[in-house]
Image: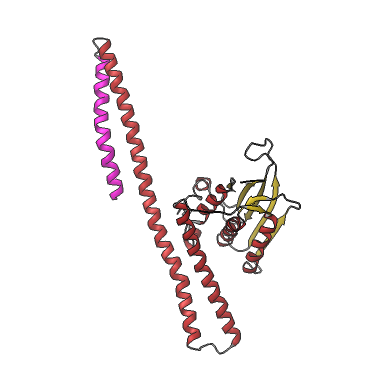
Amino acid sequence: MRDRRTRFLAASFVLLPAAFLVVVGVLVLVFQRGGIDVAFGVLILCFCAAVLAGAALLVLALKRESDTARLQADFLSKVSHDFRTPLTSIRMFVETLREGRLEDDVRRQRVLGLLAQEAERLSTLIDRLLEFARMEAGRSRYEPRPTDLGALVHAVAARFEARAVGPDVTFAVEVEPDLPLVHADPDAVAEVVQNLLDNAFKYTLDPKRIAVSVHRERPAHPTPKSPRGAVEITVQDNGPGIARQHQGRIFEQFYRVDDRLARATEGSGLGLAISRHIVGAHGGRIRVDSEPGAGATFVITLPIGSA
């Protein structure tokens, strides 16, 4: 409410004088007595047009600042919850082990596995926040080298497949043979692929069908930036899909689609923003093709050769 009142007052201080000057300019033009009056009226109207344009930009800037502040507040609330959940689980598992309530070795091993899983989940969240902080400060550093994206995707898929098991999960990997190497930081690109697979798993209801593929893309008209084409990594799911009005914004920091499934799913709203930054730093592109109810397909395009 306070932000709305601020925008209204800011617009009023600009729009009311501008409206008055518009009336004066029109009256001068209507009751003109010479060329000077015409010129004066035109100047007044031009000035008013500039003021009105400035007022519109001011309102848009204030609205964007208000939206960013709201998203940051939502982000802090969500991240606090995301930290609290694994920490609570870790504390509970540690207390259970310390008090010796698990005499069965099988149950003890299961609890240890869950403890490791929660610790890894917490570590992933911290790493994502640190990466975002480096990205915001312009201190992201990558170590590009000739990279086989097919082998990289196979390695990420193996880790993902170990977690995404069950009768209601279908996971497929397809890699085109003899792919050319790309000049990229393999750890950073692996983080992007892992993030897309995690999102596909989280936002897709059972039965889940997730597929990742790697193939060569040859542009019809090669550009100086990528004269030898590019390699594409595609992650596809059968989830609820993404409405067109959200597709341009899901790569913004803190942004999350406001629907029931998204609200019930853990996430900081940083994964896709970080992914876009990493792909862009390698001279590539990331996009999404989706329709509501028809799943989503994320496509990473990395140029062949030097980044």
Observer-nearest residue: 196 or 307? 307
Counting every numbered tag in the picture gives 0
Position above or below: 162 against 146: below
* Residue 29 image point, x, y percent: 27, 16
Residue extending furthest toward the right: 177
* Residue 91 image point, x, y percent: 45, 78
Position above or below: 49 against 231: above
Position above or below: 240 against 17: below
Q: In the picture provided, is 107 more to the left or to the right than 91?
A: right
Q: Quadrant of residue 50?
A: top left
Whether residue 201 is visible: yes
* Residue 111 image point, x, y percent: 55, 80
Q: Quadrant of residue 210?
A: bottom right
Q: Is residue 18 magenta?
A: yes
Residue at the spot x=49%, y=48% of the render?
Answer: 249
The structure's colour scheme is secondary structure
Residue at the spot x=23%, y=10% of the render?
Answer: 33
Observer-nearest residue: 280 or 242? 280
Position above or below: 193 against 88: above
Observer-nearest residue: 158 or 202? 158
* Residue 26 image point, x, y percent: 27, 20
Q: In the picture provided, is 189 more to the left or to the right than 128?
A: right
Whether residue 265 is visible: no
Observer-nearest residue: 126 or 121? 126
Q: Is residue 203 magenta?
A: no
Q: Main secondary structure of the magenta part?
A: helix
Residue at the spot x=65%, y=60% of the render?
Answer: 209
Q: Which residues are magenta?
A: 1-30
